[in-house]
Image (cartoon, rainbow, N blue to C red):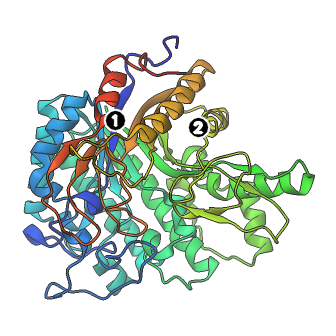
Amino acid sequence: MNQAFPDTFLWGGATAANQVEGAYLTDNKGLSSSDLQPQGIFGPTIERNSDNENVYIKDMAIDFYHRYPEDIALFAEMGFKCLRTSIAWTRIFPNGDEQQPNESGLAFYDRLFDEMKKYNIEPLITLSHYEMPYGLIKNYGGWGNRQLIDFFENYAKTVFTRYKDKVKHWLTFNEINMSLHAPFTGVGLPPDSSKSEIYQAIHHQLVASAKAVKACRDIIPDAKIGNMLLGGIVYPLTCKPEDVLKAHHENNSWLFFGDVQVRGRYPGYMQRYFQENNISITITDEDKQWLQNTVDFISFSYYMSGCATTDETLSTAKGNILSMVPNPYLPSSEWGWQVDPQGLRYLLNVLYDRYQKPLFIVENGLGAKDLPDTEGNINDDYRIQYLNDHLVQVGEAIKDGVDVMGYTSWGPIDLVSASSAEMSKRYGFIYVDRNDNGEGSLERRRKKSFHWYQSVISSNGKALKK
């Protein structure tokens, strides 16, 4: 293919603290909302404490907390320019409302970022990735309480000040629109919360995100800070006008978050939605002023597309968090997620046309049951095909004129899945010897896709096959 990717393109991979680090109570770390969902987002919420005798796979995960030097070296061997990960909020403020941060937690991320710098790997750091201090849920009621805005701002200012010379790319909340589908994971509310309660909590997060943007600009003037959306384009199932309008509304339900974070205000279609669904939220004049602090770039995840229809007799398929009507023209993965590389090109164009801001694809990958052959090799040609086809479409979008900053594949090393806390749903270029029961040596092993991605990065995309 013709050269499409700019020389500044940030190739890399993406992980999350609660899915790789383990050490869930080490060095004074507090319990997080993720620790209370040890069987994944779709599992039950379980009351836990530091004396809890039950052990779950996420408690150790892949032990990145202790093995990060080995893993960073492997990422460097692939040629990573960038690594996206998150800071565990409870490593810095164990309960969320402390006046002073936990030095042990701050020191860990100093070591991590220093290790990345040794290999010239740029950190892309998410402030809150599917977790928050459980103390803020138990004692304050989660994001439904306006006080959390100040707690989050204090946390953000603390890490910006500590790492201002080490981290120049930041994200606020991971997949912020996910709160509509999993309120406990997203905003610390019970699953039976009303829409008014959920949208009020979301509003508090949007204000907190805007305050973090302002703090980042004040503390690290040469940094860039973005939002992060769960991206999944919805097509009309048919050309029936009702289906087209239904798809339009479904897309707006998540693009709304981007509209607020990029345009700095609530769009008219959401005002109408609130009115027609008896949703009442409090938005102060001061909130409106804070929302003017808009992001520098838009980041998003992309795994699948889906369809919308007014025909309620058709069943839906769940992928990631979203449920959508399957597209009859697309194949599906082992987990029923529909594979749509051209949808990524389309989504990139939609987002760039809408916002005219740089875009960053910070999650995209294929979960599969990787099985070593008799010699211990993992020949994951299906993953190579998936990623190749999606990256070809990224190149096409760049040729369309879309400004794409980079691509971080989810996840470059096998990790614990967020949805169901499985190890068998593997995404990595690096195999980790651990199974769903928590058994295994944790040995790291290069898959076939490791060498493929290495060639893609070293050629700046020229090794991709159309």
Location of residue 392 in the rendering, given as x and y in whole percent from the top left corner: 53, 26
The Cα–Cα distance between marks 1 and 2, rounded to whole angstroms, is 18 Å
Location of residue 242 in the rendering, given as x and y in whole percent from the top left corner: 89, 57
Q: On the rendered structure, is 180 left or right of 21? A: right
At a point 49% along the width and 59% down the height, the residue shown is: 176
Mark 2, Cα crowd under 10 Å, few <14 / some 14-19 / many 20+, is: many
> Badge 2 is on which residue?
341
Location of residue 12 in the rendering, given as x and y in whole percent from the top left corner: 33, 35
N-term mark: 1 or 2: 2
Q: In this view, does 464 lie above or below 226?
A: above
> Badge 1 is on which residue?
449
Q: Which amino acid does label 1 sit on?
A: Ser
- In contact (CB < 8 Å): disc 1 and disc 2: no
At a point 22% along the width and 61% down the height, the residue shown is: 434
Using the rendered view, name the quadrant where residue 289 is placed: bottom right
Q: Residue 266 carries which label?
A: none
Q: On the rendered structure, is 199 left or right of 167? A: right
At a point 65% along the width and 56% down the height, the residue shown is: 266
Q: What residue type is labelled 2?
A: Pro
At a point 16% along the width and 63% down the height, the residue shown is: 440
Q: How many marks?
A: 2
